[in-house]
Image (spheres, rainbow, N blue to C red):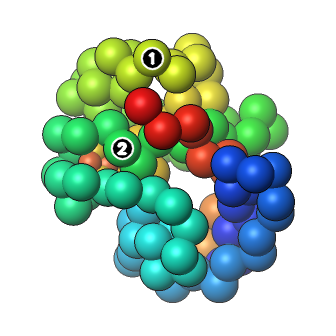
Amino acid sequence: PTIIAIDRAGQEHRLAADTGQSLMQVLRDNDLDVMAICGGCCSCATCHVYVADDWLTALDPQAPDERELVQDSPHFRAGPSRLSCQIPVTDRLDGLRVTLAPED
Ligand code: FES
């Protein structure tokens, strides 16, 4: 599947992703500036992205630990804010559009 990512300068990137990767891994593999300090174990919130409105219902609902962590971000937006390490890439997400959240 192809993931469309908007970096912090507003530039759009079309990324080839493999199913089974997390969205965070896809962003990092393509040198997008995602710190992902915890390596994807849902404890750092430095993989924060905003999911485009029309894609929100395509994603599985957030687990409680993801929700609690992302809500603590100063850049949290109710609705689009997600932790990219908690989004597994599937074929269903072909065309998914996300924007990197500002760094804390
Ligand atoms: Fe740390 Fe996602 S990489 S919460």
What's the residue at 81%, 50% (across, down)?
10
Asked if disc 2 is less than 8 Å from ligand 1, the answer is yes
Q: Which residue is mark 1?
A: 74
What's the residue at 56%, 67% (across, down)?
32
Residue 101: percent from the left, percent from the top? 57, 38
Q: Which mark is residue 46?
A: 2
What's the residue at 81%, 63% (across, down)?
12
The answer to whether one can see residue 51 in this image is yes
Mark 1 surroundings: few (<14), some (14-19) or many (≥20) residues within 10 A: few
In the rendered structure, which disc, 1 or 2, sits on the residue that comes first in sequence? Answer: 2
Is residue 20 shown left or right of residue 80? left
The answer to whether one can see residue 86 in this image is no
Asked if disc 1 is less than 8 Å from ligand 1, the answer is no
Amino acid type, label 2: Thr
Q: Secondary structure at mark 2?
A: loop
Residue 86: percent from the left, percent from the top? 36, 50
- Residue placed most toward the observer, 13 or 21: 13
Q: Is residue 93 above or below residue 25?
A: above
- Measure the alpha-carbon separation of dots 1 and 2: 11 Å
Is residue 100 shown left or right of residue 2? left
Q: Which mark is residue 104?
A: none
Q: Secondary structure at mark 1?
A: loop
Q: Is residue 43 above or below residue 90?
A: above
